[in-house]
Image (cartoon, rainbow, N blue to C red):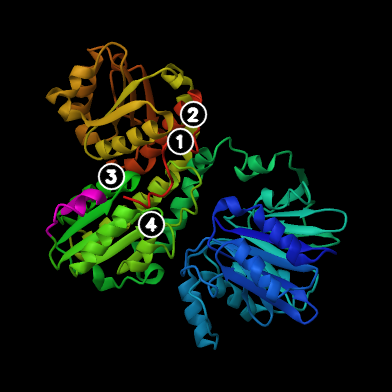
Amino acid sequence: MCGIVGYAGSREASDVLLGALSGLEYRGYDSAGISVLTENGIDTVKSKGRLQALADRLKTHPLSGHCGIGHTRWATHGEPSDLNAHPHVTEKLSLVHNGIIENYQQIKNKLVTSGYEFVSRTDTEVAAKLIDSLYSGDPVDTIRRAQEQLEGSYAFAILFADHPGTIYATRKGSPLIAAKTETEGFIASDVPAILQYTRTYVLLEELQIAAVSADGISLFNPDGSQPVLEYRTASWTVEQAQKGGYPHFMLKEIYEQPKALRDTVHPRISDGLPSFELQDDIPEGFWKQFEAVTIVACGTAMHAGMLGKALIEKLARIPVECDIASEFRYRDPILTPRTLVLLISQSGETADTLAALRLAKERGITTLAVVNVTGSSIAREADYVIHTYAGPEIAVASTKAYSVQLSVMYLIAFKLALANRRISGEEAQNLTAGLLHAIDATEQVLTLGADIQEYIKRYQTLKDLFFLGRGLDYALSMEGSLKLKEISYIHCEAYAAGELKHGTISLITEGVPVVAVATQSALLPKMISNVKEVHSRGADILLICKDGFEVDPDVYSKCIRLPALDDLFMPVIGVLVLQLLAYHTAVLRGCDVDKPRNLAKSVTVE
């Protein structure tokens, strides 16, 4: 996610802000900027690229003052550029923002009719100009009235030109802290930003408003009351703080999935229906023109695509091919003018996927990309783009990026089914509600980590493991197998359970571990028959199933039960268990979880 810092004190604010932002570089960013209250009012410098680019620009445009705010941006709305970088400034104020304003387009339309002009493609500029339009001279009152209109998640740090020496801040859904020394005040989105200056801080609660100056911190509750400040003292190293208290970035990112899913899905729902018009500039009529879909991706993204294929075919009744990008390029694929080529990539720079995109475009085929990095090569070159809002992933093994890719596959399937009149508006609303319910259920599933840890002690010296699944569970098992092998170095394979008798069962001997994923009601009897087949040959079975399924306890060693959702949505929560299984197994075996051997985060060569 993006980084926010703020400083009020006696030192040059620009120096402190750059130092604080350097403590947040681990989060990933594509541009940076600062605003400082100078003798002539608010002055701002910002730049696309790394912090060094901002530092170089400050050499020719120095900012002198003792109060300011800064930001490192991970692009969501609008490509990485100087214009889209934060802070966003009006005559009255300067604002930086983490999060996503879901109703920014509606607010922007109203502000345009009131005479406001916009220079960026960001939701943040909308928030800044909304606050500008409401400004009464009282920052706290103005921010409170803006909160009543804003939907989504946000953490704001704001300078008001007529209140020099004070930073105002508030949050909803995105973290923010206020910190102090005897003579200085700070705002930050994460503890690492302020560790080199102070370890004493206050956590802002939802919708609280902070006023921070060199003299101290004032907090205001939504009802206007002022709470007693509860100071905390950070006892972490910088590295520990960057991980938010988690031992590894991968575990932190697993637990960030509920928020990433909400950030990705909620802005694309309008009146209870999936909508890509405002968020992604995809016109309503776009979805009616296709008679076939080809999904192209690599690795984890490919597994999201496999589930996307199943969802689209089931709901929209449109034939879908799912291709590994490196194979797609060389098989001379059959593509018609009414084929949609759907490309999935976390980084937006995956070499084979980018080459597949260019091949499709050479043939005049419509391309739609699902990427997590705004301004990436795939995002720039595709005809249409849906940006996922997972934020940066530090761990090599993808977790939250996969989940948000999968959530977009659901929305696309709903949209295609509705556009092709395979489902009614009411059915589409029910499906959308089901997806939101599944996202809420992820919180419950994340509590299963301790249960998994206890069971997998037997995996410490493991050499081989098998995953079994049917239907949606087969695609899910492939992702579970990939996660386990890439970070624990255990040889493991995922098989469609019905294929056991076609060779795989010869590998099942006494004590061989099998993870059986059985969340699909219609396939449960057949799946349990397969489980019995491997159990009778001595397999040590971990069964993952839906709560309420009746399964003979004699056929498994351990059963992990998931919340009972509709079968269609079980992959949303099922993958969390498989990620936790892989993570805890890798830790048990002493592996470098965040940086597994021989792997890179983004594969930019063939």
Quick one: label 4, few (<14), some, or many (20+) residues within 10 Å?
many
Q: Which residues are magenta?
A: 320-334
State left or right for residue 124 relative to residue 158.
left
Can you see residue 238?
A: yes
State left or right for residue 453 relative to residue 405.
right
Camera-nearest label, 3 or 1: 1
Q: Residue 504 occupies which quadrant of the picture?
A: top left
Query: Where is mark 1, residue-wise?
Result: 596
Ranked by sequence position, the earlier of labels 4 and 2 is 4
Query: Where is mark 3, residue-wise?
Result: 568
**Badge 2 vs badge 1, beta-carbon distance below 8 Å:** yes
Look at the picture and state if 478 lies above or below 82: above
Q: Measure the alpha-carbon separation of dots 3 and 4.
A: 31 Å
State left or right for residue 602 relative to residue 419.
right
Query: Where is mark 4, residue-wise?
Result: 349
Q: Residue 369 occupies which quadrant of the picture?
A: bottom left
Ranked by sequence position, the earlier of labels 1 and 4 is 4
Query: Where is mark 2, residue-wise?
Result: 591
Question: What amino acid is at disc 4?
Answer: Glu
Numbered-mark total? 4
